[in-house]
Amino acid sequence: MPLADALGRPLSSLRVSVTDRCNIRCRYCMPEDDYVWLPRGSILTFEEIDRLVGIFSGLGLKKVRLTGGEPLLRQELDHLISLLGRRPGIEDVALTTNGVLLARSAKRLRAAGLRRVTISLDTLRPDRFTAFTRSARHADVLAGIHAALHLGFTSVKLNSVVIRGFNDDEIVDLLEFGRSQGAEVRFIEYMDVGGATRWSPDAVVSRREILATFERRYGEIRPLAEAPRSSAPAERFALPDGTTFGIIASTTEPFCRTCDRGRLTADGMWLLCLYAESGVDLREMLRSGATDQAIAAHITGVWRGRTDRGAEVRLKAPERGALYQIGSLRADPHREMHTRGG
Ligand code: SF4
C-alpha cells in the first residue's frame, strides 16, 4: 500500500529549500530590513539532501522542487540536480527561482538534467520591480527568462503574485508577455503566511477577480480539466485563442484536500504544511547516525498522522490578518516563507 496521511493524501512531492538567503527583498516574502539566518553549519550538504530524497523516494516521493530563499545563490546547484536525477523513482526535478542569476547558470542547470523551471515575475515595469524588491535587477530577470526559453527546458513558467495597488493593473500585460514568450503565467493570490507581515485581506486579488478581468478583456475563459485527483496547486484555464494560464487560489479557495507536498528547509527541518507551526528535525537524525530504515520509519509514522490543512483552517479564521508578526518570526526563523521554501 502506498504511504498515505490521515486524510488519504500520498507523500509524492517535496519542496527542498537549499538556502534561506535571497538576493532581493520582495514585499510579500522578505519585507523587513534584517533577518535571523540559519547557522551555516546547520545547512544540509548536497549529499545529505540526496540521501533524504532517496529515503523519501522509497516511500513514494516522485517530484522534487528546489527552492530557497533564492536557490541559485547556492554554489554548484547543478551538482545536486544531477545527483537527484539519478535517484530511481524521482520522475521530476524542478526549480523555482527569482531569475536574477538564471541567465548565467541556465546552461549548466539544463546540462545537469533540469527540465522544468518556474521564474517569479510580478511586474514588467523596472521601476516597480525596484520599489517592490529593493533591487534594480529587473533586466537580469528578463534575461533569465529569455535564457531558459532558448535552452530547451520542457517547461518554463512565470509566477506572478497579484497584490492590489501594486500590480493588479498589470495582469493582462503579464499574460500577454507570457503569451509572446511562449511561457505559461500563473497568477498567485497573495498569502498571509510566513514573512508576509504586511498582508491584509484587502490586498488580496481573488481568483474570481482575476478571471473577471480576463473575461472582460478576452471573452469566455475555459477551465482546463486536470487529471483526476491532481495535486497541482494551479488551476489552469484557456483564453478563446487557446492561450493557457494558471491561478493558484491558496487564499480564497485552498486545495488542501489534495495536498501531497512536504517541505524540507535548508537545515533539514521537514514541514508537513506551509502553515505548520513546527517540523521534524531530520538533520539531527542524519547527523546522529540513524540508518535509512530508521529515518524512513520515522517519516512513515509522522506522515500517517498528518491532518494538516493550513490554508483551509486560515480561511475559516474569523479575523484574518498577517499570520505572524516580526517578533515571532525572529524568535523562530523556521516560520519565515524564505526558510520554508515559499
Ligand atoms: S496549506 Fe498546507 S495542506 Fe494546504 S495546500 Fe498548502 S501546504 Fe498543503
Image (tube, rainbow, N blue to C red):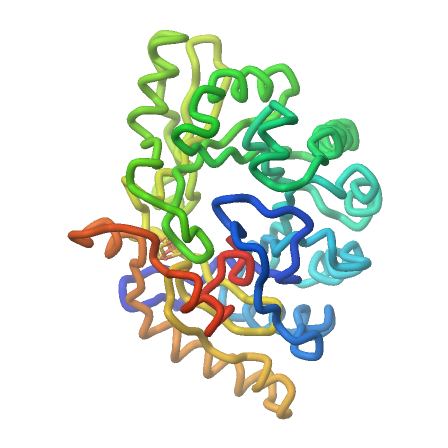
Residue 267 in percent (x, y) is at 61, 73
Residue 258 vertical placement versus 179 (above, below) = below
- Residue 198 vs 215, above or below: the answer is below
Report the quarter where the N terminus lies.
Answer: bottom left
Along the line of sight, the residue nearer the viewer: 279 or 38 = 38
Q: Nearer the viewer, residue 262 or 102?
A: 102
Task: Reply above or below: 164 against 199.
Answer: above
Classify 310 as above or below 120.
Answer: below
Ligand 1: which quarter?
A: bottom left
Q: Position of residue 29 (x, y in %)?
A: 51, 50
Quarter of the rendering containing residue 137: top right
Residue under the point 43% across and 25% down: 168
x and y, in percent, of residue 183 in the image: 61, 26
Instruction: Indicate left or right for 193 with 91 as reference.
Output: left
- 96 lies left or right of 280: right
Q: Residue at x 57, y 68 (%)?
A: 36
Q: Is residue 118 left or right of residue 73?
A: left
Left or right of 226? Residue 296 is right
* Residue found 51% across the figure and 69% down from its top: 333
* Residue at the outermost front position: 33
How many numbered circles are shown? Answer: 0
Q: Quadrant of residue 210?
A: top left
Q: Nearer the viewer, residue 131 or 208?
A: 131
Q: Residue at x 61, y 39 (%)?
A: 118
